[in-house]
Amino acid sequence: MTEFHSPRSEDLSRPVLKIEDLRLTASQGTRELVKGVSLSVAPGRVLGLVGESGSGKSLTGLSCLGMLPQGIERSGGEVLVAGQPILDLAPSEQRRLRGSVVSMVLQDPLSGFHPMLTVGKQIFHSLQDHGVEKESARARVLEVLGQARLPEPEKVSNQFPHQLSGGMRQRAMIALALANRPSLLIADEPTTALDPTVQAGVLRLLRQLADDGLGVLFVTHNLGVVAGLCDEVSVMEHGLIVESGDVAQVLENPQHPYSIELLNASPRLSSPHILRPPLNGARTNEPPAISVEGASQRYGSRGIFGGGAVVNALSDISFEIPRGSTTSIVGESGSGKSTLTRLLVGLEKPTAGRVTVAGHDMATLNPASEREFRLKVQLVFQDASRSLDPRYTAEELLLEALCVADQKASQSAVLQLCDRVHLPRTILGQRTTHLSGGQRQRVAIARALARNPEILVADEPVSALDVTNQQRIMGLFRELVEDNSLTLIMVSHDLALVRDMTDTVITMYKGRLMEATPAEEFYRRPRNPYSQALLDAMPDPSRIGELPTVTVPALPGRVG
Amino acid sequence: MKSLIPTTLAGKVGVAGSFICVVLAVIGPWVAPYDPEKPTVDVLQAPGFAHPFGTDASGLDIFSVVIAAFRTDLSIALLGVGASFVLGLVLGSISGFSAAGGRIWGVLARIVDAALDVFQSIPVTVFALALAAIFGRGTGAVITAVIFVTTPVFARLIRSSLNSVVRGGLVASCRILGLGTMRTLTRHALPNSVDSAVANISVSLGVSVLLTAALSFLGAGVRPPTPEWGYVISMGANYVATGQWWISLMPGLVLCLSVVAFALTGEAVREWLAGAGLTAAAASEEAALSTGQTERTP
Amino acid sequence: MVRFLLRRLSLLPVQLFGLLVLVFLLTRLIPGDPAYALAGGQATAEQVERIRQSMGLDQPLWVQFWRYVTGVLQGDWGTSLQTNSPVVHDLVQRAPATLLLMFFSLLMIILLVLLLVGWLLWRPHGLAHKVVNGYGFLAGVVPDFWVGLSLVSLLYVQLGIGASPSGQLDARLTVTPVTNVGLIDAAIAVDPSAVANAVSHLVLPCITLIFVYLAPVVRIMSAVTEKVNGSDFARFADSWGISPWRRIRYILRFTSPTMVTTLASTTVFLVGGAVLVETVFSWGGVGQYAVAAVTRSDYVGVQGFVLIAGLFTAMVYLANDLLHAAIDPQLRKA
């Protein structure tokens, strides 16, 4: 393994990044976004910069490149990159440093790459712009793609960004960032949009690069990732660093109340929690709430000239869900869980097989039976801001949910609904755009509960929220299930999140059902190798220094 | 409800200008200093105190004709654009909401889409010219031409806004709740989709005025002696090369300024709508931006 | 790529069919007896009857349509009522002049928009911003016929630039009409003074078209460019130290699909612009012919003109789609 950056002896003592009392303001100095941040990154070390949205962590990362957005100014402090005060330099000097001393990777590689140039071409350009001549540049392109662990670097180099999968694209972005051998890499949530199994691989790559001498500033909100990857961690809240130190020290023994709060809210697989006894409250002697037999869903058709794409979103799925139980459907992107959700709530009809929900056969749902069906089965969407009409107030939305079938609803019914989801009554007169994410989601849940459905399907209901909010909303779901003996279907990609409230876990992969197992057995030892891979890939804040493993077993099934 | 006064200087100028246009359209023929249709003795006079815009070859006072023309051009624009908006709303709804409707709706939507495509296959001016010819020229023909040309614009705006609302999940959530198709369309989908069309009304008024003037300039529009800007310009066209520029250029200037006023008003309307944050599209953008302080509250 | 090509070309017959339906229906919408309209205002009763028979106007509508379509495909687009010669002949004779005007204008528009947008990217917050936004504001506001007349007054009458709006060449010059395009005919005849004269006549109409139709392109491209300039894409390129010159090229390339689409619709608008500008400058092209057809109720001529405009538009949109596939790899699903 070639070292891509060999630190000289004097470099080892000097940090690649040193921020001293950085202050950033917006709106001509009226709003302070970063209020005096200090940190340092040594060569070969990974510093995790943790905070929720609005903490100022991304801005801090950008300042290391001297790339503050329009309207943001530095009102105090210094940023020293390899000893150079990057915010004070002339633009041409800054440009020289970018790419060759400090570099960045973003969350979404698809929006970062030029869509019309091949990956190799763009890496080649970055080398040329730093003065590397053609022959060496060509060789370097392949070399750096190999260092990013991309199989067949030659082939990848000639592909366009949209032709690569998410994980490969992120590796290609890392390759581009490293082409000119910088000593510092700013990684802003690079794995947040990736599936857990893919994320694990990218994290391993970053660790290896750090071990070879690269200094990394890893900006994230996920403490589990920090535990596995980082050497040091700094916690940011509202523009200030509230705690920093060695990762073991901060995560095992947090001092600041905010750090403690964050840690408590982070879902983890390894805590000694008491799992629910199997099928608590479920009524197994009654007909199942949901019964799926051999269901398949196929999209698309072959167009003329063979241009159309056929997608087998679901292949031969079968399972049963007893009434009153809580089931989690877990899978990564492309697993088919969204398609299955749509089938269960009657938004689509299956192309094959039989889906029976609350006694209704989904294939024969007509407008008359649909009305009855909708009383029994409801859905909570992932993104409340898109499913709630912004022109109506919360009160009007709740009223609408209550009197859909032209029933009269009383004001007290609205208030009752509000209380059930723990919403302060003061928000009723406001439009949902003025509410916080958590409040919006509660309104959406309230609407779903308005006419007391038997079955509630929640499609990634908390993935758009901050970690502290996620816990609260999951707690609300738990409470609702217990109070109303609801049958709850929770669709998620996060096994740690659903662990404390689910009776059964169903895992899906590329349209197939991998397993449907009682929770206690699942989390101890799942029956299916893919489920095991998913569990292994989950970051865990208590597993310090242990990177999520990448165990991708040989799996059956066609590539979709 | 947000204040109706535009925030930018441009917006204020635009709304004021549009207001003046409307006022002149109503009272124009009465405030004109001379009768716009009766020639005076002063033939081919350059702009001066007696005739601010000069006179033409038959002694008509250009200023009076221009003032009187406001009524002609604006009434055509208002009628044409008004009818187009309503028609465009209906057609756009049929086409843009077909995903939520039944089989028959789907068939209708296909027909509407095909028609919209066909209307896009001919340049606007050419199409308007042909229509004016077919319908026999004159004010009625011009209004018809305006309707044919403007309706597709509104239909397409409504269609694409509806498409993004449907894609955004609002329609699916209404359906899951049990709301019927028509109710979803009228109470949720459409109100969130009209913003771009409403902001475009002002722009379309300007386009209509330009089209009316162009058709009349070519002799295919409003029949003389009805006062109309384009027609006056055409009357003065032969005199420009010999130095009597005022007959063509002054009416054209007024025409430009009116269209500018409408365009600025359209921008102000668009900003007002965006600021009130009422559409579903604007909302999800705002939601993404407003995280931070608000995310911490349960 | 081949599959994409085939799929796109297969749409063409459908589009053309729609166009033919529309053009056909236009003349059938004329209030009153179409036979009178199509025979012309001067026709006698027997001539009207003859028209009725030969065009089959007493037949059901779809029979008439079939006859029309077969006629069009064979090159018989009817006989113009104003010139009494076949419409196809009239159009072919006049088209080159119009195309010359449109070609030069479009060329200059492309050059100028690239210059202006490039300038905007080079110095985003200085004079470029003001100039581009100020000029872009004129988009859709100025009527081309008035601009043409204003230019005649300002540039020709006051400053002596260009030539009088009297056609492609001065009346006193005689050049053998080969292509009916003043400039080309003068070049063929190797007559330098005539060539110079033709160029001087070309100046004002072109400036008119450029001035009016460059504005919307500038407006759209500057808005798109500014948006891209602040996007993730530009930020990431900055983060690896892209050189300023390459940055401009990256952004221009990124926005090239929008540029292609905008230029395609500009070309279509130019047809309409040509109609008006030709009238102002007595250019003698297809546009002027169309206007004459309208004012003289030559419905056959009108129909022919609309058809050729529609065909031209279809070609432009086809070129647009093909160019898109060529520049954007995401469109060619390999």
Image (cartoon, coloured by chain):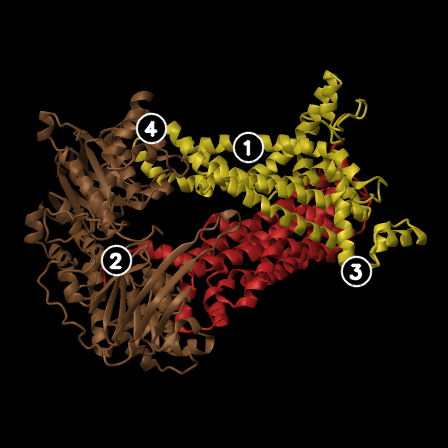
Mark number, residue A124: 4
Q: In the image, what residue type sits under mark 4?
A: Phe
User: At numbered mark 3, what does the secondary structure look like: helix, strand or loop?
Assistant: loop
Q: CA distance from mark 3 to mark 2?
A: 65 Å
**Residues tagged 3 and 2 counted as in contact (Cβ below 8 A):** no
Which picture quadrant has residue A492? bottom left
Q: Secondary structure at mark 2?
A: loop
Name which of mark 3 and mark 1 comes first in the sequence: 3
Q: Which residue is mark 3?
A: C60
Return the x and y of residue A284 as percentages of the image width and height: 23, 78
For chain A, what colour was chosen? brown
Q: Is residue A60 left or right of residue C64?
A: left
Number of numbered labels in the structure image: 4
Separation of residues labelled 2 and 4 (CA atoms): 37 Å
Of the two numbered discs 3 and 1 in the rendering, the one whose residue sits closer to the viewer: 3
Q: On residue C258, which mark appears?
A: none
Residue under the image location 71 percent in, 39 percent down: B246
Mark pair 1, 2: CA separation: 50 Å
How much space separates mark 3 and mark 4, taking CA atoms?
Answer: 67 Å
Question: What numbered label is drawn on residue A493?
Answer: 2
Crowdedness near tag 2: few (<14), some (14–19) or many (≥20) residues, C-alpha within 10 Å: many
Instruction: Give the chain of mark 2.
Output: A
Visible residue check, residue B31: no
